[in-house]
């Protein structure tokens, strides 16, 4: 079955499970631990004072945008920071920025992520009769980019693990703790490269209870209150007041049911300006003979926006466990589709990571003889003077070792099986030749050289399935594909049946 999904679902689940890297200061005299702690880890130094009088309070991905929340008391330095970090501003913006700087206001800067487009993208949900969820990466290769992030969310009865890809545990010492994990994505990429480019990192694995009422609640959206509205501006205002999702699907509905007149477009008016102030273009809409079909709009709203949210909430409420996994994959590495299984023997994984920080902190933003005690037991010593939260230079305190602390194979039960670095290529080739995950896991044992058995065949969503998946029991899999190859997958047991 193919139905519509919702980008709002990915934004909500992503925000609730985003990896975070914090430092917990002890004996700092109040000089180090008083910086704002960000809600998420991003691609820049969050909660950190930059080297040009700018404080980055938050950095996160919001739909197709990369956003940062900034604070500064010098408009010139803020303008320079924006230009240096890809938020290019014309010099004419300086007096406008200065106005708000003097009012002590915060700034939110946005720009499109590298893989985002201007099109209206709405995810789709594919429901298939297969016992293991999978992501059809091979089909993605034609339009992929180098080190493309693949974010996967799996709802099921237990923690999800990659069956025919490696599982990778990153070395926490490689993380830039003083800039709240600003290099996290690069560390993940380096670690996965050490797993032949075929690995996933588990970012979160725990109860799905945090998703209760996250995207849908009974009575949350009452479309009957929209009935009878004939004024486009009044409709948009009603949608805003009621808190309807403001995503690509809603934008597409506005384009369809309140199209911008050609005369307005001819004047160079942008879509954003038009829909943000429909009252100002009433005369143009009237001249074009526009009449709002509110019943048609409501029907589309329920089908394209509300029903996907309600279906997603149903999955959240009926599946007890949520797993978030991340990989970064280049086109040449998209040689097989990752398949996922459920393993109830594994521990939970928190998305919040805290390093205990010790040192003598001074009021000039420096600390003497800084020590970081990581949650995995590692102790990092930064001897001498360290300037906190300044600059964006490379993190050099994690040593010269690999970014992957451990590469492993995980089955549907039992603990992970560690894989030696010099054995990765052999096992990766075995996966590519079609050997079942169970056999490849056996091959990873010391003294094992290989087996002459192949899985053969395949099926379901373009993914090659292992013999372990042909158990005679099917599963309903809800897979939503969004920007950046993000997916929400559902695995639930039920009787196998033929699907048209």
Image (cartoon, rainbow, N blue to C red):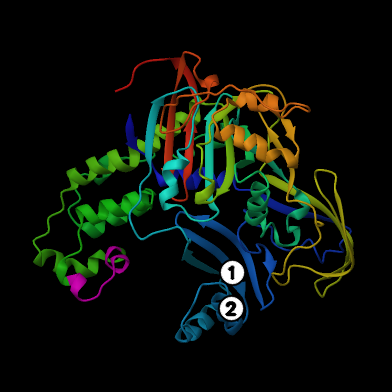
Viewport quadrant of the C terminus: top left
Residue 62 has which mark? none
The location of residue 457, given as percent across then percent down, is 45, 24
Viewport quadrant of the N terminus: top left
Quadrant housing residue 266 = bottom left
Q: Residue at x 47, y 50 (%)?
A: 484
Magenta: main secondary structure equals helix
The location of residue 407, given as percent across then percent down, is 71, 39
| On screen, residue 202 above or below 442 | below
Q: What stretch is highlighted in magenta?
A: 264-275
Question: For mark 1, does the 10 Å Cα neighbourhood hold few (<14), some (14 to 19), or many (20 or more) residues?
Answer: many
Q: Mark 1 points at which residue?
A: 70
Residue 102 in sight: no
| On screen, residue 266 above or below 312 | below
Q: Residue at x 51, y 15 (%)?
A: 471
Q: Is mark 2 on a helix, strand or loop?
A: helix
- Point out the tag, 2 or 1, that comes first from the N-terminus: 1
The location of residue 10, given as percent across then percent down, is 47, 44
Q: Residue at x 53, y 44 (%)?
A: 151
Quadrant housing residue 85 = bottom right
Residue 455 in sight: yes
C-beta proximity under 8 Å, tags 2 and 1: yes
Q: Name the residue under label 2.
A: 78
Q: Magenta segment: does it hold 151?
A: no
In this view of the protein, which residue sits in the foreground, 5 or 477?
Answer: 477
Q: Is mark 1 on a helix, strand or loop?
A: strand
- Is residue 233 toward the left or the right of residue 351 in the image? left
In this view of the protein, which residue sits in the foreground, 69 or 327?
Answer: 327
Q: Which residue is drawn at 37% across and 15% down?
A: 497
The location of residue 178, given as percent across then percent down, is 75, 61
């Amino acid at each position: 079955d193919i139905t519509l999904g919702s980008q709002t679902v990915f934004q909500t689940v992503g925000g609730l499970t985003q990896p975070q890297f914090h430092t917990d200061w002890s004996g700092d005299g109040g000089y180090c631990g008083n910086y704002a702690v960000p809600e998420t880890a991003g691609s820049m130094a969050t909660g950190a004072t930059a080297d040009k009088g700018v404080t980055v309070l938050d950095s996160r991905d919001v739909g197709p945008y990369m956003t940062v929340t900034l604070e500064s008391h010098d408009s010139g330095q803020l303008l320079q920071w924006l230009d240096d970090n890809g938020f290019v501003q014309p010099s004419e913006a300086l007096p406008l920025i200065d106005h708000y700087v003097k009012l002590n206001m915060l700034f939110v800067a946005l720009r499109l992520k590298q893989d985002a487009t201007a099109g209206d993208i709405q995810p789709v949900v594919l429901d298939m009769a297969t016992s293991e969820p999978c992501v059809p990466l091979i089909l993605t290769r034609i339009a992929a980019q180098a080190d493309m992030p693949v974010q996967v969310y799996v709802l099921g009865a237990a923690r999800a693990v990659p069956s025919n890809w490696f599982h990778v545990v990153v070395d926490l010492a490689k993380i830039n703790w003083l800039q709240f994990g600003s290099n996290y994505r690069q560390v993940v990429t380096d670690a996965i490269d050490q797993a032949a480019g075929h690995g996933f990192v588990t970012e979160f694995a725990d109860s799905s209870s945090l998703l209760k009422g996250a995207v849908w609640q009974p009575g949350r959206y009452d479309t009957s209150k929209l009935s009878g509205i004939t004024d486009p501006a009044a409709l948009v205002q009603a949608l805003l007041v009621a808190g309807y999702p403001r995503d690509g699907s809603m934008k597409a509905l506005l384009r369809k049911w309140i199209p911008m007149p050609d005369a307005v477009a001819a004047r160079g008016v942008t879509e954003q300006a038009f829909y943000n102030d429909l009252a100002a273009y009433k005369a143009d809409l009237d001249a074009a003979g526009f009449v709002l079909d509110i019943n048609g709009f409501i029907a589309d709203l329920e089908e394209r926006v509300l029903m996907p949210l309600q279906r997603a909430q149903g999955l959240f409420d009926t599946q007890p466990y949520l797993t978030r996994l991340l990989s970064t994959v280049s086109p040449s590495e998209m040689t097989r589709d990752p398949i996922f299984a459920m393993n109830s023997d594994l521990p939970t994984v928190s998305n919040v990571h805290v390093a205990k920080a010790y040192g003598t902190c001074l009021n000039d933003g420096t600390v003497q003889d800084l020590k970081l005690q990581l949650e995995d037991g590692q102790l990092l010593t930064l001897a001498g003077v360290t300037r906190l939260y300044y600059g964006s230079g490379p993190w050099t305190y994690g040593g010269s070792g690999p970014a992957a602390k451990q590469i492993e194979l995980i089955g549907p039960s039992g603990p992970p099986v560690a894989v030696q670095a010099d054995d990765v290529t052999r096992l990766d080739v075995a996966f590519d030749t079609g050997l079942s995950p169970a056999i490849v896991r056996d091959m990873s044992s010391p003294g094992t050289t290989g087996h002459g058995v192949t899985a053969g065949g395949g099926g379901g969503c373009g993914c090659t399935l292992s013999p372990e998946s042909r158990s005679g029991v099917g599963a309903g899999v809800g897979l939503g594909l969004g920007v950046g190859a993000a997916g929400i997958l559902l695995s639930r047991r039920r009787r196998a049946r033929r699907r048209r």
